[in-house]
Amino acid sequence: AQSVTQPDIHITVSEGASLELRCNYSYGATPYLFWYVQSPGQGLQLLLKYFSGDTLVQGIKGFEAEFKRSQSSFNLRKPSVHWSDAAEYFCAVGAWGSGYSTLTFGKGTMLLVSP
Amino acid sequence: GAGVSQSPRYKVAKRGQDVALRCDPISGHVSLFWYQQALGQGPEFLTYFQNEAQLDKSGLPSDRFFAERPEGSVSTLKIQRTQQEDSAVYLCASSWGQGESGEQYFGPGTRLTVT
C-alpha cells in the first residue's frame, strides 16, 4: 500500500527566508504527487502536482517542488516566505484504483512564519 | 465559479445520535470523495463515487458509516450511533472525469464533535 511521510511536524521560518518542506513517499509504480495547503478553517488548496515529465514543477504562490525518484522524495520549496504562507502543508500520493485515483496524505507540516 | 460546499460547517452530537453531513460538489464534476481528518492528522480516504455509483467504500471505518449520492450530484455522509472516535473534520472533494488526474477540489469540511 502507498504511504507518505512528512518528517517535520512543525517548521518555523523567518519572513523572507527560504523554505523547504520534506516529503517521502512509498508507492509501487510511478506516483502522482501533490502538495496541498490548509489554512485554519479552510479546505485544502492544491499548490502543485507532478504526473510525469519535468521533475521540477512550479505551482501557485511561488512554490515549486522537485520529484526525485531515487530518493522517493517530493520536497516543496519557496525562495522567500511571506507571513501569509503560515498554514499546514500536506503532501499526497495519488493511487490508482479501477479507473480512478484516491489520495493518501502525509500527516502534514505546520509552517510558522516569524517576523 | 462556486467551489465545493459542505454543510453544516460545525456539528455537535451526543454519543449515540445519528448525523448527516452534506456535500455539494462543483457542478459537472463526475467524481466525489469523502475524507476523514482527525486532529493533527492528514485526511484519510473514506469513500468514492463516480456519478451516483459508489465504487469504493474501503475506507469507511465501520458499518455505522453510510454515504449516498442518489442523483450524481449532492452527496450525504451519514453516521449512525455516533461514538467519540468519530470526532473529526469530514472533507468532501470532487473532480472532473473519473479522477484520473488525481486533482481534487476540496470543500471547507464539517467539524463533527461527539460529546
Image (spheres, rainbow, N blue to C red):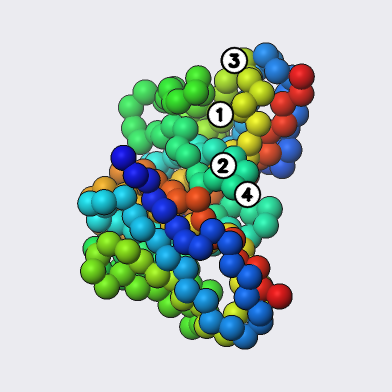
What secondary structure is marked by label 3? Answer: loop
Lower position in the chain sequence, tag 3 or tag 2: 2
Label 1: which residue?
A76
In the rendered structure, are the residues bearing label 3 and label 2 in contact, judged by CB atoms less than 8 Å apart?
no
Lower position in the chain sequence, tag 2 or tag 4: 2
Label 4: which residue?
A107
Lower position in the chain sequence, tag 1 or tag 2: 2
Q: Nearer the viewer, mark 3 or mark 2?
A: 2
Lower position in the chain sequence, tag 3 or tag 4: 3
Q: Residues within 10 Å of mark 1 (few under 14, many from 20)?
A: many
A48 lies left or right of B86: left
Determine if marks 1 and 2 fall on one subunit. yes
Q: Residues within 10 Å of mark 2 (few under 14, many from 20)?
A: some
- Residue A51: tell me if it is visible: yes
Alpha carbon distance from label 3 to label 2: 20 Å
In the rendered structure, are the residues bearing label 3 and label 4 in contact, judged by CB atoms less than 8 Å apart?
no
Determine if marks 3 and 4 fall on one subunit. yes
Determine the chain carrying the residue at label 3.
Answer: A
What secondary structure is marked by label 2? Answer: strand
Badge 1 amino acid: Leu
